[in-house]
Amino acid sequence: MKKIILSLTLGLSGTAMAAALVLPALAQESLLPEGFGNPAETPAPRPSPTPSPSAAPTPKATPKAITIAPPVTPTVASSAASDADDTESGEEGEEVAPGTLKYDLPPGARRLLTRIGPLTPETGGLAPDAFGVRGQYAAAIMRNTRGDLASRWGQILLRRSLTSAIDTPETINGADLAAERAALLLRMGESIAARWIVQSVDYDRASPRLVSVAQQAFLANADPAGMCAYVPAGLAHGDEQAWRLAAAICAGLSGEAGPAGWAISRVRSSGKISNFDILLAERVLGATGAGRRSTTIEWDKVDRLTSWRFGLATATAIPIPEPLRASEPAYMRGWTVLAPMTDMAQRVAAAPDAAARGVLSSEAYVSLLSAAAGEEEPGEALATQTDALRGAYGAASGAERYGAMQGLWGADANTPQRYAAMVATARAAAALPMNTEVGDDPWQLVGSMFAGGYDHNAIDWVPSVSVGSHAWGVLAVGSPRPLSGMSAGAIGNFAGDDSSAESLRSKFLLAGLAGLGRIDASGAASAASDLGVDLGKQTRWSRAIMAAAERREPGMVALLAAAGMQGDWSKVPPYHLYYIVRALREVGLGSEARMIAAEAVVRV
């Protein structure tokens, strides 16, 4: 019980701890690549309530689970409120509606909807005008972009773009655009960044769409208390029964055991919510001392892991069975790694995927593994992995360090696992002495450096690699400066040893070189003819990303680049990589362009 209370204390933190129980009063053309979702029917979604996924059509219908998974397709419409509405509610002397929260900040401390986001150019963010002036256009692309991006560096760039303090175009409500940004971040597994965006909007200015996404964001962070500020709006515009359960939790956190129990009973009697989801809410109340009885959680009849189940189980230290973990959405592995109250074994199991996707940095990944190895009786596989990492970073000789790295890189044939190992060894690879014997083709060594962004360390190895080797190809596109002797013949030599399916690696090398402007037009045309690839193919997506580059909109370019890199690298056409690299370079994101191009050559 002490462990549960401690975990709950960590998870149930937020501004809404003091919230009282709130009881309810009685034809746009697609610009995405082919196969990547459907656009919204109209430029702006129409205001309408979200259909409850758990509502029963008749009193006898089977109760359903609370499903609050991040949507992939458009679901909720925009708020009718204007961005310019700066009126204060609940000010000194005004009556405050029963059950609502009074906003005590002075008008000057209120946050406007005209610029939303935590990162500024001084703290690593993009410029305020990075997404241009077409808000509904940007929101539509965000709604139709899945979170499973092929590129780790593409995800890192998109996260940076979506969390930047950007100006809200006049064509969209700022809260609605923030909701689409947060929803996409959740689908990417970026739960903490999604919460940043949600909390960048004052809760009483949240649109219905943002209220819905806020619930998902706080569950993804295993912070049920964060939902409390949004309960009044959720009861008015969202899934009433799910928000009643949230209201009961908030009442318990405020010490109101009676209203909490009444709300739980009312939801149970409705028959519209799965009893398992109600039991999870009761478990939260029990941990706060507001519950009237102990609650036993049994997963036997649960067939899937939803956001509600993930958030409440994690907040109360309830172990989630491995079969459910095995079938969980990919983005939930990112949530798992980023939630510090999650069982360490499950965080470690999810960490390789999160590192390969870009959710975890190299330093954060190594730190997590080190923390796990420091616990009592770590697993055998983890102990072996951390021993190899110690050797990679601290062995006496360069040869021993390199041998340890090779053991990690070759430990798993699964591509995400292997690339995650390269992420873990990035700093060790960058620190390897130059006189170390690494063979003629140390492509994994230089690939590991680029995985961590150590491009200036990687170019020191250029004299050690053979022209036409895999390592040479990675350096050709990833190096801060062009390599000499780049020609169609050199690409042909590279293609001669290409073991990838349909010479995809060679096509990516050509696409990266052409996009970076490191091969002349005639050489690129000759190599393209030899490889049978059309880098200049024109589609709605290619025209859109180049138009965004011409308008100097780096945020929009990053978003369209992500839309063109969904799935794994085997599903990314070479011409997509060409336009992505070219557009990023034209808007001043040349370093990111090089990292993405190098990653493509490494991972196929």
Image (tube, rainbow, N blue to C red):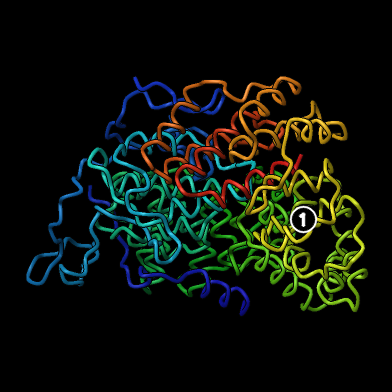
Where 426 sits versus 397, above or below? above
Identify which residue is drawn at 32% across, 68% down: 19
The amino acid sitting under disc 1 is: Val
- The crowding category of the residue bearing disc 1, from other C-alpha atoms within 10 Å (few below 14, some 14 to 19, many at least 20), is many
Looking at the figure, which quarter contains the C terminus?
top right
> Which is nearer the eye, 553 or 357?
553
What is the quadrant of residue 13 in the picture?
bottom left
Identify which residue is drawn at 45% across, 32% down: 546
The residue to which callout 1 is attached is 446
Identify which residue is drawn at 29% across, 56% down: 23
Identify which residue is drawn at 63% across, 60% down: 360
Where 303 sits versus 432, above or below? above
The residue lying furthest to the left in this view is: 93
> Which is nearer the eye, 429 or 435?
435
Where 380 sits versus 354, above or below? below
> Which is nearer the eye, 330 or 357?
357
What is the quadrant of residue 15 in the picture?
bottom left
Looking at the figure, which quarter contains the N terminus?
bottom right
* Relative horizontal placement of residue 434, taking residue 197 as reference (left or right): right
What is the quadrant of residue 93 in the picture?
bottom left
List x then y, in percent, for residue 101. Answer: 24, 65
